[in-house]
Amino acid sequence: MGVYVRTALPVLLLAAGTAGVILRQSQEPKELWGYVQVRNKVHMFWWLYYANNPTKEFTELPLVLWLQGGPGASGCGYGNFEEIGPLDKEMKPRNTTWLQAASILFVDNPVGTGFSYVDDCSLFAKNLTMVVSDMMAFLGEFFTCRTEFQTIPFYIFSESYGGKMAAGIALELHKSLLDDNGLAEVTAVAKEIMDAINKNQYGLATELWGKAEGVIEEVRSLSNNTDNVNFYNIMTKDVPEVKSDEEENLHLVRLYQRHVRKMHKNSLDELMNGPIRKKLKIIPDCVKWGGQSRQVFENMAEDFMKPVIDIVDQLLAANVNVTVYNGQLDLIVDTMGQEAWIRKLKWPGLVQFSQKRWKALYVCPESMETAAFYKAYENLAFFWILKAGHMVNDELLGV
């Protein structure tokens, strides 16, 4: 989901991936990193790369804040070295980077993610309100210290679950600135989930979400219906890690394994806890990159299934430009699901938006290969990216 706030600090949010732009860096970018104590005993880690454009100063380009999904996946690690940062996980210059278009600020959020950490396990964020509060504390400190970014456009890009957090952050910023059998089984669990949500039983809804994925997992393992479909890209296969059924909160554990732990691959884990730790020189000895991520995920369980449609309605009412987009092959954040919640908006322009026809976007001006479809009305737009899964920026370049 994308949002652009027309205020002194414009804000753009993108969830479920990022439409890739082919950019090449000209030289090694200037970078800074550090910690902000957002609450007592709560430490948030950030990593900033200044824009690296051969013809423009960084002050002529916007600042992009990148938030990873999960919750509990590290933007400073995964987003940085696996997706959009200047270097890949082999520490080699990336062929595609956004640094010619913007400065990039990675933040390990919520607290406990990546190199962020808490001194007391009771201090993990447990809901969107706490996540937003921590991020507002961070942003206040960041912009106070980095005055060079106070007068340039500010964009928030977020991926997957990060879209929910980013929507809440955007609204708070706006306020502060004034400004078959298998199908039957899955369907049955989906109805249970909706029933739990309608009864405000969000913890139960999260557990049932895990159960629903478990049903899909069983179907894809025991039959040819899905042939081990990957939750992030239905055109690829995936063999999930299986934990003992005796472990407590099994559905929650499996959700963590599918959606957060996979972002802490061995090679990336070794990089972050080895060469990167040595480079940064400020990571406490007691902190391991990603070491608190499972606790982050579990502490947010009650908040997973709470809808934020009302927040989007408030953003639209505040004349914020909202862009929603999805990869065609994404299962975990699927296009039909996005269309379904959009239909629940109370925004006055929804009828006109729904009546709009899809328009095609092409890979490049010289090509007639369709890369995406989109439609827009007033301050709401929807992009449907073809041949792309959950990590749109990894799978489709040049749109």
Image (cartoon, helix red, strand yellow):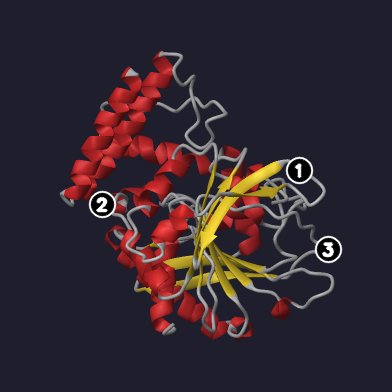
CA separation, marks 2 and 1? Answer: 46 Å
Extreme residue toward the left, this view? 199
Question: In the drawing, what numbered circle is on residue 92?
Answer: none
CB within 8 Å, label 2 to label 1: no
Q: Position of residue 385 (x, y in %)?
A: 59, 45
Where residue 52 sits, quadrant-wise, is bottom right
Seen in the picture, residue 282 relative to 304 is either above or below; the reply is below
Q: For residue 212, what is the image quadrant? A: top left
Q: CA distance from mark 1 to mark 3?
A: 30 Å
Question: Can the viewer see residue 41 in this picture?
Answer: no
Residue 368 image label: 1
* Residue nearest the observer in this picture, 357 or 180: 357
Amino acid type at mark 2: Glu
Amino acid under disc 1: Met
Label 3 Cα neighbours within 10 Å, binned few <14 / some 14-19 / many ≥20: few
**Where 224 sits versus 328, above or below?**
above
Circle 1 or circle 3, nearest the eye? 1
Q: CA distance from mark 2 to mark 3?
A: 45 Å
Q: Residue at x 48, y 76 (%)?
A: 139
Mark with earlier residue (2, 1) = 2
Marks 2/3 in contact by CB < 8 Å: the verdict is no
Residue pictured at 75% horizontal, 67% vertical: 29
Q: Is residue 194 above or below residue 57?
A: above
Q: Which residue is mark 2?
A: 302
Give the answer, above or below, for where 221 lies relative to 391: above
Circle 2 sits in a helix, a strand or a loop, which is it?
A: helix
Helix, strand or loop for disc 3: loop
Which residue position is annotated with label 3? 26
